[in-house]
Image (spheres, grey):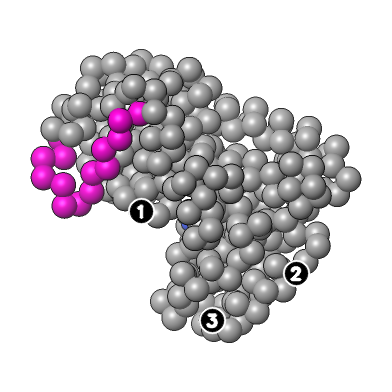
Amino acid sequence: MTTLDGKALAAKIKARVREEAVKLPRRPGLAVVLVGNDPASRVYVTSKRKDCEECGFYSEEYALLESATQEELLELVETLNGREDIDGILVQLPLPAQLDEETVIQAIDPEKDVDGFHPMNAGALLIGRPGFLPCTPAGVMDLLDEYGVDPAGKRAVVVGRSNIVGKPMALLLLRRNATVTVCHSRTPDLAEHCRQADILVAAVGRQGLITGDMVKQGAVVVDVAMNRDDNGKLCGDVDFAAAAERAAYLTPVPGGVGPMTRAALMENTLLAAKRRQNLA
Ligand code: GUN
């Protein structure tokens, strides 16, 4: 079994991004907006700041109160849309209950939507036009490519159908000529579907969901989830030890998909900066 080392590849990608970024007439700028006090979100925002430093980007952080209003957040997004030096805008999700995520996402200039969540970018992915790809599925594809895993002609099973991961993941695998099945909470006999998978992507967020017997011999298994086990340790959806007995390739948690998501955000921000300087 080969471990798909996302940490190592992410470091390589960020070094490459930096090389390009420092050559631009104006360095890429990313604005990260955090609303409220979600501890996981705080950790993500801090790591994005570090990534920006590593890549030679300009970055700004906005911390809004848990009680922030929709108007307040939309006004900030509008200001950032108009800023010449800001190429990417990321509003950290989830948002507090009084805020409407859809409205906020749609307010972001699609040219600065480095999360790839705006309907324009989601639509571009659907019909195969250029846009911004959501970072986690884009990072997974980078990881598969690095290890020479070609999805063409393979059976791919994606477990989870979120707008952020499951759906775009399925579309990217389809674009690369895999035969794709999307499973979800209402799928009868999940195990039977998973056992057919040459490429299995788990993106649900439930520890222990994918057991060893659900992994086909020689499969490529990608675990997107970030759960906390009873001891507070990070873990994925896949029983790693059991899956390792059968899989040919397997991502660890942590150190697999997580760092790749962050690297993809840096790649998207670089791309946004190049496009906005008419260099891509
Ligand atoms: N929350 C969890 N993952 C993400 C992500 O990729 N982007 C944003 N904006 N929020 C998230």
Density class for disc 1 (Cα within 10 Å; few <14, some 14-19, many ≥20) is few
- Which is more N-terminal, label 2 or label 3? 3
Q: Measuring 41% from the left and 76% from the top, which residue is drawn there?
A: 97
| Residue 190 belongs to the span the image colors magenta | yes
Density class for disc 3 (Cα within 10 Å; few <14, some 14-19, many ≥20) is some
Left or right side of 177 for 38: right
Residue span colored magenta:
178-191
Q: Percent from the top left, x then y, of residue 124? A: 52, 50
| Residue 14 belongs to the span the image colors magenta | no
Asked where in the image residue 63 lies, by quadrant, the reply is bottom right
What is the spatial separation of the Cα atoms under label 1 and label 2, in whole angstroms? 30 Å
Left or right side of 134 for 269: right
Q: How many marks?
A: 3
On residue 70, the disc is 3
Residue designated by label 1? 162
Circle 2 — which element?
A: helix
Residue designated by label 2? 82
